[in-house]
Image (cartoon, rainbow, N blue to C red):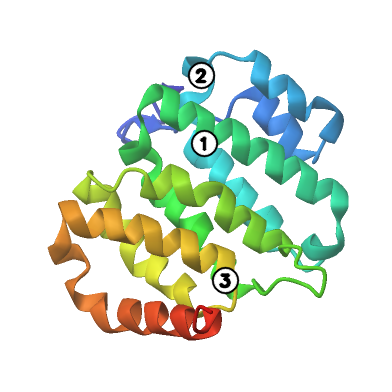
Amino acid sequence: MHGPGPAGSPLIIRPLSMHQLFKLVLGQKDLSRAGDLFSLEDSEIEDSLTEALEQIKIISSSSDYQTNNNDQAVVEICITRITTAIRETESIEKHAKALVGLWDSCLEHNLRPSGKDEDTPHAKIASDIMSCILQNYNRPPVMALAIPIAVKFLHRGNKELCRNMSNYLSLAAITKADLLADHTEVIVKSILQGAAQMGPRS
C-alpha cells in the first residue's frame, strides 16, 4: 500500500488497485471469467469501480471495438456488474465522474441504429449506464456532472435513447430546474423534433 522512500523523501502512497478478477477480465478481455464477477459481494468490488470504468473507456475507444464481439460482450457484462454494485452500495457520487466520463466518450462514436434498428455498440453502452446516472435526478452533485452530457445525446440520431433521456431530464427538472436552465433551448428543440417525427395522430 505505502512505505517510506529514501531518507528525506515524502511518503509514497499508492491508490488501491483494481480487484484481481476485474483486472483479469478487463486486462485480458476474458469473456469466460466475466460472469464470475457476479459471485463477488458488492462491497468487495466497490473500491474498484472507478478504475474498472476507466479501463472500459479505454477498451471501448479502441479502433476495432465496433467489430469485436468478444470485447463488446466483456464490456456489457462488466457494465451490468458495475452499475448493479453502484446501486446496491449507493456509491453513485463516488463513481459519478468515471461513469459520466465513459458516457461522454460514447458521443465520440456512431450512435445511430443500423438498418435493422439495432443499437450500435456505443449506443448500448450509453443506454446501459443512462439509468444508473439519471435515476439519481435528486442528487445535485451527480446531475451537475450528468446534465451537460445528457443534453448532447438529444440530437445524435437515436430516437430511443433520446426519448428515454428526455423522460429522465423531465424528472430532473421537477427537483432541480436550475440545472437545466442553460440547456432549455436544446431540450425544447429535441421535444419539437420528436413530435414532428411522430407526425399527426389520425
Q: Amino acid type of disc 2?
A: Asp
Q: Which residue shows up at 80% across the image and 49% down it?
A: 71
Q: Which residue is drawn at 33% across and 69% down?
A: 148
Q: Which of marks 3 and 2 is in front?
A: 3
The one nearer the camera, 161 or 88, is 161
Q: Marks 3/2: CA distance?
A: 33 Å
Circle 1 SS class: helix
Question: In the image, what residue occupies the spot 66% across and 62% down?
Answer: 122
Q: On screen, 187 above or below 78?
A: below
The label nearer to you, 1 versus 3, is: 3
Labelled disc at residue 42 = 2
At label 1, the amino acid type is: Thr
Decide: marks 1, 3 in contact (CB < 8 A)?
no
Image coordinates for residue 130, horizontal then vertical, percent: 48, 52
Cα–Cα gap, marks 1 and 3:
23 Å
Residue picked out by circle 3: 159
Q: Is 1 above or below relative to 98?
A: above
Question: On the image, which quarter does residue 150 sit in?
Answer: bottom left
